[in-house]
Amino acid sequence: MHPTTRRVLAAAAGLALLIGATACANDEQQAAENVPGVTDTEVVIGTHQPLTGPAAAGYSKISAATKAYFDHVNSKGGVNGRKIVYKVMDDGYNPANTDNVVRKLVLDDKVFALLGGLGTPTHTNVLEFVKAQKVPDLFVSSGSRNWNQPDKYPTTFGWQPDYTVEGKILATYVKQQFPGQKVCHFGQNDDFGRDSLVGVEKILGPVAAKQTYTPTNPQVGPAIGALKAAGCQVVISASIPGFTALAMGQAAGQGFRAQWVVSNVGADYTTLSKQLGDKKVILEGMLADNYLPMAGDASNPWIQAFTKIHQQYNAANPIDGNAVYGYSMAYTFVQALLAAGKDLTREKLVDAVQKGGFKGPGLTPFRYSDDVHAGYSGVRMNKVTGGVQSYFGPTWTTDDGDGEVKEFTETPTAPPADAIPTT
């Protein structure tokens, strides 16, 4: 071969390698630039919340606390140099509205992920759309088992204990403390109520009577009358706050004196007492469960840390159980962002949550893995006494199957400096 020809071919080969390397680098840069909602300085996330409608009481304050926590994190530089932009859309706890606002968040606002979309009937309505768009759908604010279907909905994750786990633990307590009494169930007429009843009946067998309510219909008098007529002595209630207040108010008005044992999602004392006003005395003795620090426990280090954030960024709202929920969920999300790394992709965020290992304010461990997309694994009982809602007894964990209900004895994690995770 002629020497000149060799030089030309070598130069051409080198140029091809250079072009290939440049193209590869450009492809990587293009891929990074094409991650929806992510820039060098921001990560945009979205949520649907009931800022109005039948679930607004109490729940409308969750997103305010979540935003306050992100404002706090952003004031310290954000996560890996990115500020968190949090877009909150009101769906009024109406599934049709949820579909509209989630489509806007994903298709128009190009959010990187959804966080804490609230409600069983509402979020169920968008699962197929979210799946099709491959959007990370983290920490749905509901204990439905719908979120724990990784084969069917690989990007969706729960956060709070699911309602069957909760139902098993509530029923275990009732079985121990109210032996021989007639136990009944009052629940929302969707997966919230149904999943709760599944858990209850795994422990107690068929309940003596059961009634449901529809969130759009506040007329619960007939259902409460039916429970009274059935002679119910203990009522386990899977209800959102507005309907806990309505049900207990109706029971008092009808002279129906049963022991109420209420799901954590509808049992925040501050929220209920505000709704009931001068009738809040009927909350005395109410039993419930929770898995986060009690908002009124000023000695708890997490409450102390969240209160500082609350006073600076969210002082117009009460620091109640809904606020603690919002702060705690946002804390977990920051852990997930950190675990996903600096070069954010949707796939890396989903992988980070599946790997789990998150620590925080919760009383029990998370259940996250490749095969489980459920959140916290248990709860602890509490009671209203003298207008104060306080924990008592052990913390319990279980699963949503036939696993036993067991005591959990590990000491809760203390908050890091500034209540911001570092890893």
Image (spheres, rainbow, N blue to C red):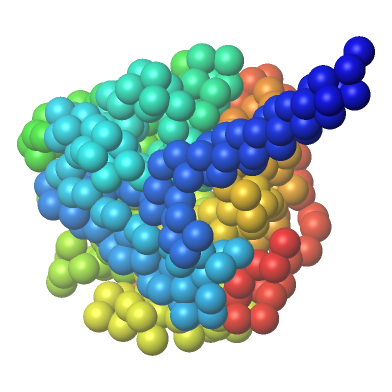
Q: Nearer the viewer, residue 48 or 300?
A: 48
User: From the viewer's perspective, is 269 left or right of 21?
Assistant: left
User: From the viewer's perspective, is 76 left or right of 53?
Assistant: right
| x, y percent for residue 258 | 34, 44
Is residue 115 in view from this perspective?
no
User: From the viewer's perspective, is 277 left or right of 359?
Assistant: left
Up the image or down, 377 lies above or below 384; here it is above
Residue in view at x 40 percent, y 48 percent? 37
Residue in view at x 65 percent, y 33 percent? 19
Is residue 347 in view from this perspective?
yes
| x, y percent for residue 189 | 26, 24
Q: Nearer the viewer, residue 262 or 2?
A: 2
Up the image or down, 47 lies above or below 180; here it is below
**Quadrant assignment for the C terminus:** bottom right
| x, y percent for residue 172 | 61, 36
| x, y percent for residue 419 | 60, 75
Residue in view at x 59 percent, y 53 percent? 337
Up the image or down, 126 lies above or below 414; here it is above
Residue in view at x 29 percent, y 55 percent? 87
Q: Nearer the viewer, residue 75 or 234?
A: 75
Q: Nearer the viewer, residue 76 or 332?
A: 76
User: From the viewer's perspective, is 17 left or right of 113?
Assistant: right
**Quadrant assignment for the N terminus:** top right
Counting every numbered tag in the picture gives: 0
Up the image or down, 310 lies above or below 195; here it is below
